[in-house]
Amino acid sequence: MVLLWRAKSRAAKQAAYRAVAKTAAQRVKSERVDGYILPFNSQSANIYLETRVLNTNQTGVGAATAGIVRGLVDTRFKTDISAITAAEQLRVPKFRFAKIIGSERTATVTEPTPSRKTDTPYLRHRSNNISCPFGKATVSDNYSAAVEEIKAKPAFKTFESTVGNRIGFTAEG
């Protein structure tokens, strides 16, 4: 089956992708701002790594999902570290932060469509996916405790109670 995909020309692959991809007007474009995260693998309370985090003001497609995702981790990053005594900020371009990924189902499909790679029919549900990096809230915090704390929030439970919605996590590293 995979050979079917490999046999296609580059133009045919691009056409197959365009046939199933969302249009530009349907895609999520989250607004981000500079942020600072205390990474889980650090023992310091003063060294923050620079990254981009979700802005509080979101507009357009996926704005509600972005607001929920940001609200779940908003205590686990800073947008201003000037008030923190002896705080240092570092830019580490290739660092992989822990990440929360919220996926809100926007359309439930009842008719199967063939896979562009294998031609096998399946239900292709549409969703808005938003992610945001996060880190420690305190120097003694750890990743497992952070995930459990996030999962215990009412907003997490409410979001996941809707059929098709889900929230996942990716560990740092």
Image: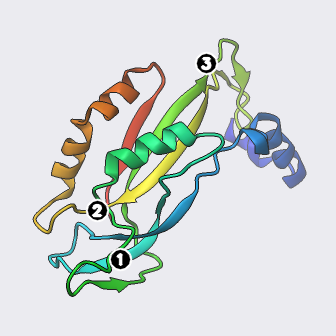
Q: Which residue is mark 1?
A: 49
Q: Relative to 164, say whether 6 is above or below.
A: below
- The percent position of residue 93, horizontal first and vertical second, equals 47, 79
Residue identifier under label 2: 135
Structure colour scheme: rainbow
> In this rendering, does residue 4 appear at all?
no
How far across and how far down the image is residue 124, in percent? 64, 26
- Give the quadrant of the N terminus: top right
In terms of sequence position, does the residue under pointer 3 or pointer 1 come before the other?
Answer: 1
Q: Is residue 41 visible?
A: yes
Is 132 on the left or on the right of 40, as rendered?
A: right
Location of residue 17 (image quadrant): top right
Q: Nearer the viewer, mark 2 or mark 3?
A: 2
- Residue 138 lies, with reference to residue 113, above or below; the image says below
Query: Tag 3: residue type?
Result: Thr
56 relative to 62 in the view: left or right: left
Taking the spot 70% from the left edge, 13% from the top edge, the residue there is 111
173 above or below 11? below
Residue, disc 3: 108
Residue at the spot 65% in from the left edge and 12% down from the top edge: 110
Residue 24, percent from left and from top:
77, 45
Residue 38 is left or right of residue 79, and the answer is left
Amino acid type at mark 1: Leu
Q: CA distance from mark 1 to mark 2?
A: 10 Å
Near mark 3 (Cα within 10 A), the count class, few <14, some 14-19 or many ≥20, is few
Residue 104 placement, left or right of 123: left
* Marks 1 and 2 close (CB-CB < 8 Å): yes
Tell me which label, 2 or 3, sits earlier in the chain.
3
Marks 2,3: beta carbons within 8 A = no
Q: Residue furthest front?
A: 83
Residue 35, horizontal then vertical, whole percent:
42, 69
SS of the residue under disc 2: loop
